[in-house]
Every structure is written in C-alpha cells, then in structure tokens.
C-alpha cells in the first residue's frame, strides 16, 4: 500500500509502505474511509519537532474493519468505526476515571495517512456506528476522531456551562470546534480570538457571538472591556505557545477555568502571574475516546457538522499539497481521501 511518510522539514512523501498486519491478538486492521492532516503534524513538518527517522504520518481516522485479532470481542469485520489517536483499553482505572488518552496501555497511533491502519486495543479504542454511514457524513465522522474530540475536551475542561462567557484562543480547527462545543454546552457568549476573515466567518457559523482581533496585552484588554472588567468564566487555549497560554490565563476572571489542549512548545509557566490569576487550569492530550459515542450520535442525527473545518479536500496522493496549504494557512484543515476511495 501507499501512505504519507515525513523525512524531514517540509519533506513529506507519498510512497510505498508495508501493509499493516495483526501484530497482537487485540489489534484490528481497518481500511481507511477518510483521513486528514492535524495541526500537530505541522510541528515536525516545520522542523520545530525534528523527526529522527522517516515517520509514517497521520492519526485521525475512520473506516471499515477488515480483520480482527483472536481476542477482539466487540469489534467485527465489516463494521464502520471511528477511533482516537490514542489507543486505550477503556477498562483500566485511568480510563474509567475519564482519561483514556493516559491509559496504562496507551499507544499513540501514527500512519493513518494511508490506505490501511493497524489499531491496537481495538475493543477499547474503536467505536462502531450502527450502520454504514453515507459518504456525505464521512468528514463529520472523521472530525470526531481527534479535532472535534479535542475541541470538546477544551470546552468541557474549561467548565463551559449554560450562561457562561467563553473565550477561545486560537482559530485553528480545534479552536473553531471549541466554539461549536461551547455552543452545544449552552454558553451565553462565545468570544473567538481570530484575525483571519474566513476563520472568523466559520467561528460565527459555529456559534461565536463576538470576535476579537487583538492579541497579547491588547487582546487581554479587549476581553476585559467586553466582560465588564472581569474576564471570562471559561477560556479555551487551543494553540500551545507561551503567548497563547498567558493570553488565556489573563483573559479569565479570578476563579475562572482555563483549558489547554494544544501540544505545548517551549511553554514555561511563571509562578507569580499564575498565583495571582486565581484560575483553574486543566488540559492535556484530549481523552477523545470518552466523548466518541456522544459525538458520533450528534453527527449521525445531523445536529452538528464539524466536518466543515475541512476546507480543503484532496486525494491522499496529493498529501504534500495538503500539508503545504495548512503550513501556509491557506487551508484550515485538509481532508485526504485514501486511494481506493478517491475514485468513488
Ligand atoms: Zn486504560
């Protein structure tokens, strides 16, 4: 089969790779129906997080189960499934406590930008839909696999409740879906921080009530001005830089909640500003598996359309163009149709 392999900075190739096989009796093999490029794929692509060796890329996926290992009970060949980027048993104490992305048996998946994928701990990791979904729902279902699940966690961890004033820092796909999640959770006002017109438009469509284009000190001042001087009840930090995290903490009211879901790069928290901010901080790799059944149901009943973040949709053979468009911020998020699907 063929798939995407990152060799180094800006060097993503679509090339022959070994077919995955069942390696453990708890594995499943799936044929991808759709996959995509994640904002976190851009860190190694940009050389900020160097790759030691050629790396098979991609961790967002949905598709049809082709084969399962001898110990897999709940997942069957022929089912349509969605899974998280973190494989989990869904039975250990950490999983039962709601954090499958820190499961004691966790494995981070990679290699989903291909025709086929091996998924470890299939019974715990995958969620099957009741029927085979129509093709037009594939982008929405694919979004639940990571980007929506992460936006959802961002809103949940920031304690978004009916009546809350919410700020979303970051207008990437996760931030935009954090807006959608906050709307679903009943936020009264959702202030999206964005300076890009197409992203502002999508943020408003997903439920943002206000847009703030300023950043840093000016951004914080603007949030304070819009919230009667107090700051927001809930702030979703969806970037992962020092600047965005400090902007989030300073935008929250004393006693407010700040979530952080972007993989941090060179972030160091300063004790004193944190101490006097009086905020609750909660984040980490999103426990997407916890939310999958609920998110899949919302998609299948047509209540949400998170797949609208995929503003570029290409055959997987053009994966390099897909990375480039996201790197240059010409695309919010690139969906990739695997080879066998492209011709459908
Ligand atoms: Zn577990």
Image (tube, rainbow, N blue to C red):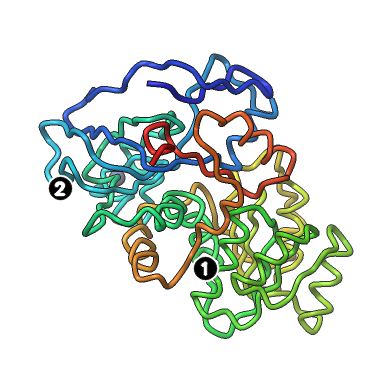
Residue at image position (76%, 64%) is 250
Quadrant of the snapshot with the C terminus: top left
Structural distance between the alpha carbons of marks 1 and 2: 29 Å
Residue at image position (26%, 43%) is 89
Quadrant of the snapshot with the N terminus: top left
State whether residue 217 is above or below residue 23.
below
Q: Residue furthest right?
A: 218
Residue 126 lies left or right of residue 291; in this view the side is left
Look at the image and tell me whether residue 275 can be seen.
Answer: no
Residue at image position (65%, 57%) is 237
State whether residue 129 is above or below residue 242.
below
Quadrant of ligand 1 in image? top left
Label 2 CA crowd tier, 10 Å (few <14, some 14–19, many 20+): few
Camera-side residue of 90 and 306: 306
Q: Secondary structure at mark 1?
A: helix
Residue at image position (23%, 40%) is 65
The residue beneath circle 2 is 74
Specify whether tag 2 is near ligand 1 (CB below 8 Å).
Answer: no
Residue 135 lies left or right of residue 53; in this view the side is left
Q: Earlier in the sequence, mark 1 or mark 2?
A: 2
- Residue 20, image quadrant: top left
Image x and y of residue 284, in percent:
52, 49
Look at the image and tell me whether residue 35 can be seen.
Answer: yes
Q: Secondary structure at mark 2?
A: loop
The label on residue 181 is: 1
- Residue 165, image quadrant: bottom right
The label on residue 152 is: none
């Amino acid at each position: 089969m063929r798939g995407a392999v990152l060799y180094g900075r800006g060097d993503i190739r679509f090339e022959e790779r070994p077919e995955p096989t069942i390696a453990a009796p708890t594995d499943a093999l799936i044929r991808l129906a759709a996959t995509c490029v994640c904002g976190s794929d851009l860190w190694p692509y940009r050389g900020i997080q160097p790759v030691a060796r050629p790396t098979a890329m991609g961790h967002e996926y949905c598709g049809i189960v082709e084969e399962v290992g001898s110990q897999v009970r709940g997942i069957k060949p022929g089912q349509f499934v969605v899974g998280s980027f973190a494989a989990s048993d869904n039975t250990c104490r950490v999983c039962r406590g709601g954090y499958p992305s820190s499961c004691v048996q966790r494995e981070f998946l990679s290699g989903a930008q291909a025709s086929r994928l091996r998924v470890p701990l299939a019974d715990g990791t995958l969620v099957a839909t009741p029927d085979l979904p129509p093709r037009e729902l594939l982008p929405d279902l694919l979004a639940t696999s990571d980007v929506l699940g992460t936006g959802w966690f961002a809103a949940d961890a920031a304690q978004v409740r009916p009546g809350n004033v919410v700020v979303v820092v970051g207008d990437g796909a996760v931030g935009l879906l954090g807006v959608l999640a906050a709307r679903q959770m009943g936020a009264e006002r959702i202030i999206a921080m964005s300076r890009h017109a197409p992203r502002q438009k999508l943020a408003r469509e997903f439920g943002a009530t206000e847009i703030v284009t300023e950043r840093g000190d000016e951004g914080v001042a603007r949030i304070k001005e819009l919230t009667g001087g107090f700051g927001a009840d809930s702030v979703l930090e969806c970037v992962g830089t020092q600047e965005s995290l400090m902007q989030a903490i300073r935008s929250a009211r004393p006693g407010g909640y700040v979530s952080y879901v972007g993989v941090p790069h060179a972030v160091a928290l300063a004790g004193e500003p944190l101490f006097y901010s009086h905020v609750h901080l909660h984040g980490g790799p999103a426990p997407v598996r916890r939310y999958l059944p609920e998110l899949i149901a919302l998609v299948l009943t047509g209540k949400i359309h998170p797949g609208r973040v995929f503003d570029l949709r290409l055959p997987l053979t053009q994966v390099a163009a897909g990375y480039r468009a996201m790197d240059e911020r010409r695309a919010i998020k690139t969906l990739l149709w695997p080879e066998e699907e492209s011709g459908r």
